Image (cartoon, coloured by chain):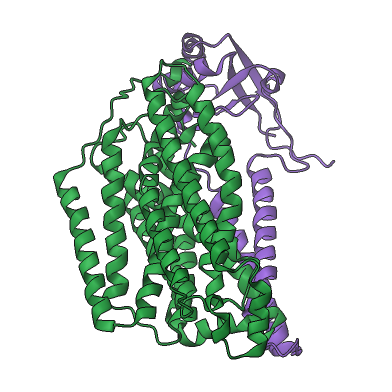
Chain colours: A green, B purple
Amino acid sequence: MGHHHKEVDLNDNYTFSPGLKKLSLGLMVGGLLAFIAGAAISGNGTRILADLLQNTIFFTLICLISVFFLAFNYMANAGWSVLVKRVPEAISQTLPYMAGMLALLMIYIVLGKRNDIFIWLDLDAIKNEEVRELLEAKSGYLNVPFFIARILVYTGVWSFCAITLRKYSLIEDQQNAGTLKYWKKSTWLSGFFLVFFAVTISTSSWDWLMSIDTKWYSTMFGWYTFVSALVSGISLIMLVIQYLRTQGNLKNVTDEHVHDIGKFMFAFSIFWTYLWYSQYMLISYSNNPEETVYFRQRMDHYEVLFFANLIINFISPLLILMTRGAKRNAKTVIFIGTLIIVGHWVDFYQMVMPGTIGNNWNIGLMEIGLPIFFVGLIINRTFTNLEKAPLVPKNHPYLPESIQHFT
Amino acid sequence: MASKKFILGIFGDEDILLEAVPAIQEKGVKIHDVFTPFPIHGLDTAMGLRESKLHTAGFIFGITGTSIAFGFMTWANTFNWRTNFGGKPFWYVPGYIPITFELTVLMAAAGMVATFLYLCRLAPGVEKHIMDPRQTDDKMVVAVEIDEHSDVASITAALKTAGAEEVNEKLIDNWYRYKIM
């Protein structure tokens, strides 16, 4: 393959710059203080819990998507992604922290019988006979012990897969070149993870998000939440890659790799819209009051967010990312990546809030502070883990393929 | 009845070909086209081809489909023949989306196929030009167009030094002929 031979420098180590470390800690402290101040000012327990719920779920799922990214690339025998693989690996190491917080929060909510968040937690408090009967029929699934068991299994297995895939990848670096043992192990684990993930990403979104509006249900909901998280998670991977490239790292990553991730961002934005529309369309067309109430409330009282959701998450990626040049342009993908993450945060906001705090919503210190805290946490954990290992997995069997990759 | 004359460099290996193409061009020889039995990654960049405009055509065809579908349903349901479907508004945009989407995809796809056939001279009735029958089997053909002013010797030398296994001449009569099937 004479033509493809180029001098390749595989030494690529990242050092967490003190400036960025300070920034990440600053974001965490500042965000947390803003959250506490906002919570103290508002004093509304439901709003505080709903805010915590929304942000913890959103950022947990974003980190989870990095594990998914690694897993589907292993399962598909994908070669192109090897050079960027250390980025999702590092992001996924935040997952255990996020999942731990999420599990604690959920257990606090269900053991505290917070029926302002999940009305199914306290059936006796429901006055309406019909609603109570409906929820009693669902209590085989929506009950406290099973709920707690489920969340422990989800967060436990997800975190296990995140940690183990990373561990295998680092052990592979220490092995002799050409040893496939840990690559095979990673592929098997990825297969297990994908099957587990396929089921649990749906059930977890029913548990944590759809059960807020307990009487309402949608068969699209699991997919919808999944893709919302997927497109944000891919955007996060893109942002970290772009940052590393500005620091002179990831020297072998070219516009071709960036282009492929850009395609993911574009395609999954369209796919998100497809699911959004499928959910909306069926309910709108059949016009059953018990189903339309979900959208009625959002369109009447969350009008700005409802339409902003579509404009930010569909129209913008569609128009901005459509051309080939845009997907390869660092500034464009950084801009649209940030926009997508903010947009899907808004999406999760309007999934959680109408069913919990009701129609009087307000984005204050608390709603802004908490995501800032989580962003700081993710930056801190991600770049700490990027520093720990070389950025090129030198013994990965598909590394040469990734170096030659072009679209 | 225009006829065209070519010098063909026959190559047997894509790695040699990928290095040969820029080397030939560096000597000032303008390559008409390269014919290969399978797609070769990187050949278009090596040849210095500009980006295909096919997707722009696709976008225009697509947006045409969008406008036709959306426009027609709007006209029919709101102005021409108002019908009450389950109490929905006459101008019921969410209900128009599936058909609008389908027609967008249909027109973009069909339009792009037609454009592609036109650009590649593959449309029914167009005379197809085969430089060398082996270009569909195991050889790659670099075609250089020549006329009476061309320096045939130096082109042949450039192809040979770049690694061509053999160099042939090919005359194609009736380049622009269309025949009825």
Task: Tell me the residue at 63%/43% (across/down).
Answer: B119
Q: Residue furthest right?
A: B181
Whether residue A260 is visible, yes or no, is: no
Q: Quadrant of residue A404?
A: top left
- Give how far across and how far down residue B77 sits, in percent: 71, 85
Q: Is residue A352 above or below residue B168?
A: below
Q: Nearer the viewer, residue A340 or A377?
A: A377
Q: Nearer the viewer, residue A33 or A107?
A: A107
- Give how far across and how far down residue B32 sits, in percent: 54, 29
Task: Tell me the residue at 44%/36% (across/down).
Answer: A164
Q: Nearer the viewer, residue B118 or A248?
A: A248
Q: Is residue A217 above or below residue A145?
A: below
- Give how far across and how far down residue B148 sits, in percent: 54, 21
- Give how far across and how far down residue A255 sits, in percent: 39, 40
Q: Quadrant of residue A109?
A: bottom left
Image mark count: 0
| A238 relative to A142 in the view: left or right | left
Task: Tell me the residue at 21%/37% (across/down).
Answer: A15
Q: Quadrant of residue A13?
A: top left
Whether residue A350 is visible, yes or no, is: yes
Q: Is residue A245 above or below residue A2?
A: below
Task: Tell me the residue at 41%/40% (across/down).
Answer: A163
